[in-house]
Image (spheres, helix red, strand yellow):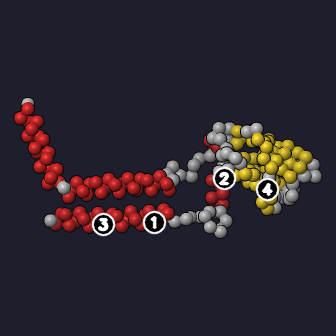
């Protein structure tokens, strides 16, 4: 009986720990509120770079959106109010105003994992065309385990622990049935 009592305490502590882990995984972390992303978060986003004699552009890819940061090559002055269009996979997309020197492009589909050519047409004082290649395979994922897969692992582990607990509680029945099965096998041989 003492072993069963210790085992049930262990299971209850394990369930409490799993509940706390699941609750902390469900917490809406950075990027889900009003706060701006930190530098470390911004560096993990896939990006591309293009330049010409007049402009330089850095594009940051976030799912189905590309944020393009544009400045003048000679002075690093932000380019404000330019009309920009990108050509990605044969479809042309115009920019939306997003801030000083920032231009937002909403894509129909996510950027493919294979190297993809992108052409940026800038209409400001002068028209210029920049070309770059987006290669998402060169960007490592921030983590191999996402919060969704961590929750799945925890749920599978909880299920396994529940099965182990129930089998421990029914071990007498299991042992009796196993002995009967072994006895029947011996009688047939």
- Judge from the rendering whether residue 57 lies leftward or rightward of residue 74; answer left or right: left
Residue 93 versus residue 115 in the image, above or below = below
| Rendered residue at 80%/49% (across/down) | 94
Residue at disc 3, secondary structure = helix
- Frontmost of labels 3 and 4 is 4
| Rendered residue at 11%/36% (across/down) | 185
Which residue is labeled 3 in the image?
A: 12
- Judge from the rendering whether residue 130 lies leftward or rightward of residue 9; answer left or right: right
For marks 3 and 2, the one nearer the N-term is 3
| Rendered residue at 28%/54% (across/down) | 163
x and y percentages locating residue 30 in the rendered image:
59, 64
Residue sitting farthest toward the left: 187
Residue at disc 1, secondary structure = helix
**Disc 3 versus disc 4: distance between alpha carbons?**
54 Å
**Disc 1 versus disc 4: distance between alpha carbons?**
37 Å
Which residue is labeled 4 in the image?
A: 96
Residue at disc 2, secondary structure = strand
Mark 3 touching mark 1, by CB under 8 A?
no
Which residue is labeled 2 in the image?
A: 62
């Amino acid at each position: 009986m003492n072993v069963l009592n210790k085992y049930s305490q262990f299971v209850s502590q394990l369930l409490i720990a799993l509940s706390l882990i699941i609750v902390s995984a469900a917490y809406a972390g950075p990027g889900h509120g009003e706060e701006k992303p930190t530098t470390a978060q911004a560096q993990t986003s896939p990006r591309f770079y293009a330049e010409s004699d007049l402009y330089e552009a850095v594009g940051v890819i976030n799912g189905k959106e590309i944020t393009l940061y544009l400045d003048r090559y000679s002075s690093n002055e932000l380019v404000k109010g330019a009309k920009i269009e990108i050509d990605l996979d044969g479809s042309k997309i115009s920019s939306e105003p997003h801030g000083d020197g920032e231009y937002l492009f909403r894509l129909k589909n996510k950027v493919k994992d294979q190297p993809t050519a992108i052409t940026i047409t800038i209409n400001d004082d002068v028209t210029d065309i920049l070309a770059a290649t987006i290669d998402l395979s060169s960007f490592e994922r921030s983590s191999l385990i996402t919060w969704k897969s961590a929750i799945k692992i925890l749920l599978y582990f909880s299920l396994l622990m529940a099965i182990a607990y129930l089998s421990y509680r029914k071990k007498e029945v299991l042992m009796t049935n196993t002995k009967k099965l072994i006895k029947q096998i011996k009688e047939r041989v």
